[in-house]
Amino acid sequence: MYKLGKRSLNNLQGVNPNRVKVVERAMQSTTQDFTVVEGKHSKEQCSINYGKGRMASECTQKDIDPEYARPNERQITWVSQILASKHATGRTVDIYPYPINMKDSDLKKFKAITAAMKQTAAELGVTINLGSNWQKIKNLQHFEVVQ
């Protein structure tokens, strides 16, 4: 049985309590160790993420300091209202297999984590949305609370 580490526990601060329960219990039943790499985002983190892949003028249109603009970086968020993102509201966590290797997209590892998250959410009566089910862009590490 695995247990959540300091990084995961820190990243669960401010996250929806139902989401935290699912993550904590899923860690106890998973066959693949994992780490919570993203939880609730501060306004600054939302601004940083929004600036990636955008020009200063695009940031200014959203009342974001143009210094956050990073047009040469890969765009990582598509929300039009940055503080309405699921991360900003504490309804989403991003989880990676442990040990962390951001380039590792081993589907078996993510499927094991997803299975544990789905089973645990069902047991707790929590509805979740899985980034792995998205149609346009698969986001294997993304788990959000719907209710």
Image (cartoon, rainbow, N blue to C red):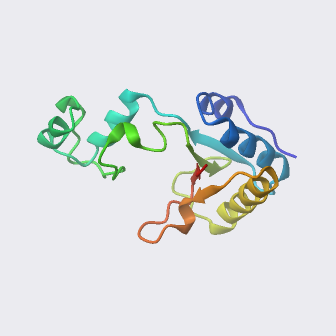
Residue at the bottom extreme, as displayed: 135
Q: Residue at x 63, y 28 (%)?
A: 10
Q: Nearer the viewer, residue 73 or 16?
A: 16
Across and down, in percent, residue 135 comes to: 46, 72
Residue 70 sits above or below residue 42 on the image: below
Q: Residue at x 31, y 51 (%)?
A: 75
Q: Nearer the viewer, residue 40 or 124?
A: 124
Left or right of 40, for residue 43: left
Left or right of 7, for residue 118: right
Residue 111 sits above or below residue 81 on the image: below
Residue 69 sits above or below residue 31 on the image: above
Please tell me how many numbered marks the rendered image carries.
Answer: 0
Q: Residue at x 39, y 32 (%)?
A: 45
Q: Residue at x 55, y 37 (%)?
A: 39
Left or right of 8, for residue 25: right
Q: Nearer the viewer, residue 117 or 124?
A: 124
Across and down, in percent, residue 6 comes to: 69, 28
Residue 133 sits above or below residue 117 on the image: below
Q: Nearer the viewer, residue 58 or 5?
A: 58
Across and down, in percent, residue 50 comes to: 31, 42
Residue at the left extreme, as displayed: 57
| Rendered image quadrant of residue 42 | top left
